[in-house]
Image (spheres, helix red, strand yellow):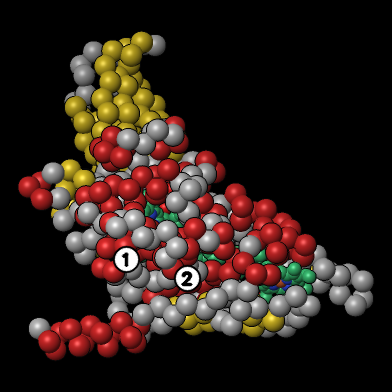
Amino acid sequence: MKLFLVLLLVASALYGAKVVEVSKEYQKSQNCKACHLQIVKDWEESWHAKSHYDKDEYFSKSIEYVARKTRKSPNSVKVQCATCHNPRIAVTDTGLDYEIQVLMGLDEDSKVNKAIESSAINEGINCVVCHNIDKIHHDRDDSFRGMNRVSWTKSGLMVGPFDDTTSPYHKTEYRDFMDKKADELCFVCHANDRSVNDLVFTNMQNEYKQQDKACVDCHMGRKILGVASILRAEDGHAKKREVRQHSFEGAHAEDMWKNALNLDVWQEKDEIYIALKNPQPHNIPSGFGSRELIIDIAYMKLEKIIDTKSISLTRHYTRRKGKPTIPHLAEEMSEDMSIPADETKVIKVKNIAEATGIEVKVYYRLVNDEVRSILELKEAIWAKKNLINSKSIVLQ
Ligand code: HEC
Ligand code: HEC
Ligand code: HEC
Ligand code: HEC
Ligand code: HEC
């Protein structure tokens, strides 16, 4: 036991995230607008910009729920989640001392509360998260993610994909994880997300099947000729460069989910086969744990619907005694129903004798019924069914 404690202390001393304060002139994306206007606008629309308790209902309600069920203060849970959701926060863990302060109502002026309420972090995953990463520590255990997997540059040094830039506002340096190895940057956080019981409920790095495209090719668009900064150089022109968008579109964006899966439907005697092929390099649904695919089937007789059937492909999470819960509190989870990269899932349903045709619609939903009801999510986007693909066939 003693040895274990010592090892644990050594490990956290070695790997514990080191806070590097960001000076005021770099804290906010507003500070970058004058010279990187389009990039800031793209980013503002992205879900990275929403990675803050005040800006994402699903995130904030998950925090409250975890706090209630684990009997911790919500602020302690916020700090825990900040590892990936808000990695420039000024405190990296909270201890028993803090819990006692909260119980006694003495936490108001604490370092923890100040860090959480600081306006420096209310932009979530902003410019100085990605562009201030000095090094990604691949040597660390897989469970070290977000702020625990990186070290930060000195405030004012921006790392980027170019090795020949100069800027009057900040220093610049090249890093390969901003360029050829950008997948590694994404996996700092998009991997190994685990519950309080150490159950890894999503791990994009494991499920990923390398194709000819990198994460940035699909989630930041193709490289196009443009400018990295609108600031004019000595010759009176801004330098032309190959750049990408900063929109990080994903499961919240129609042009991403639409046609994300290929759908095929056919009949063999009194059975209907529905094949879903996933051409993307990661599972769909993927990423966060309670996403869902819904297959709605309508049996038609001439123009009229005579019967319907709905199939849900999602994952369920349980706590003690098999009680349903959210991914972050799970002890166990059901079989993964998502469709792996480059694979096809075939589902068989019975035909109805009098049907003359069948229509199949495949939808994507951000949060399944179970978790929406546990957390009492109110906003419409979590329940909305987003059409991925549809197909009708005439039956024999
Ligand atoms: C999630 C990580 C991430 C965040 C957040 C982010 N960037 Fe980037 N940024 C990248 C990557 C990756 C590239 C390299 C893209 C490429 O291949 O050209 C990049 C490239 C750039 C470039 C070079 C031009 C280009 O398109 O290659 C500039 C300038 C830049 N970012 C500024 C910003 C600013 C300003 C913000 C905040 C509004 C920001 N970035 C937020 C990851 C990020
Ligand atoms: C006064 C103008 C100005 C401001 C303000 C500014 N930058 Fe820049 N930035 C530049 C210029 C100029 C370049 C180089 C452009 C080029 O060579 O194409 C640059 C380049 C970059 C690069 C690419 C570096 C590389 O070598 O790949 C990043 C990343 C970046 N800036 C991030 C930021 C962030 C984040 C902020 C806000 C905190 C910011 N910049 C504010 C002018 C500015
Ligand atoms: C510092 C941690 C971190 C890094 C680095 C990071 N992400 Fe994210 N990303 C997140 C978090 C957290 C969210 C969820 C935010 C939310 O919804 O509140 C997210 C959301 C997204 C989404 C939106 C998903 C959806 O459901 O719409 C996409 C797409 C995405 N990230 C792609 C990338 C790519 C590509 C990279 C690498 C260039 C990257 N991310 C780097 C943490 C990170
Ligand atoms: C060939 C294009 C492609 C590549 C490469 C790609 N993705 Fe995606 N990704 C998609 C599409 C399309 C979706 C939207 C599908 C959906 O969720 O319905 C998506 C969805 C996502 C989501 C939201 C998933 C969810 O269900 O919550 C995240 C997060 C994400 N991608 C991250 C990444 C990361 C990180 C990488 C690199 C390791 C990557 N993607 C590589 C096409 C791609
Ligand atoms: C290992 C890094 C990591 C940690 C730690 C982490 N998250 Fe996340 N979280 C992510 C990433 C990456 C995404 C985006 C995944 C996607 O959209 O597919 C995300 C997405 C989410 C979402 C979905 C948001 C949306 O808009 O759909 C919720 C809710 C969430 N996280 C809650 C939490 C809570 C609560 C904690 C702390 C108990 C936490 N996360 C800790 C990486 C992390």
At label 1, counting other C-alpha atoms closer than 10 Å, the crowd grade (few under 14, some 14-19, many 20 or more) is many
User: In the figure, 154 relative to 363: above or below?
Assistant: below
Rendered location of residue 262, percent (x, y): 41, 44
Residue furthest out toward the left? 321
Rendered location of residue 371, percent (x, y): 28, 40
Instruction: Please give left or right for residue 181 compared with residue 382 in the image.
Output: right
- Give the amino acid type for the residue marked by disc 2 in the picture: Ala
Structural distance between the alpha carbons of marks 2 and 1: 15 Å
Residue at 27% from the left image edge and 63% from the top image edge: 100
User: In the figure, 159 relative to 273: above or below?
Assistant: below
Picture quadrant of residue 34:
bottom right
Q: Which residue is the site of mark 1?
A: 98
* Quadrant where the C terminus is found in the figure: top left
Give the label on residue 90, or none: 2
At label 2, counting other C-alpha atoms closer than 10 Å, the crowd grade (few under 14, some 14-19, many 20 or more) is many
Ligand 1: give its quadrant. bottom right
Closer to us: mark 2 or mark 1? 1
- Give the amino acid type for the residue marked by disc 1 in the picture: Tyr
Question: Does label 1 point to a residue whose CB lies under 8 Å from ligand 5?
Answer: no
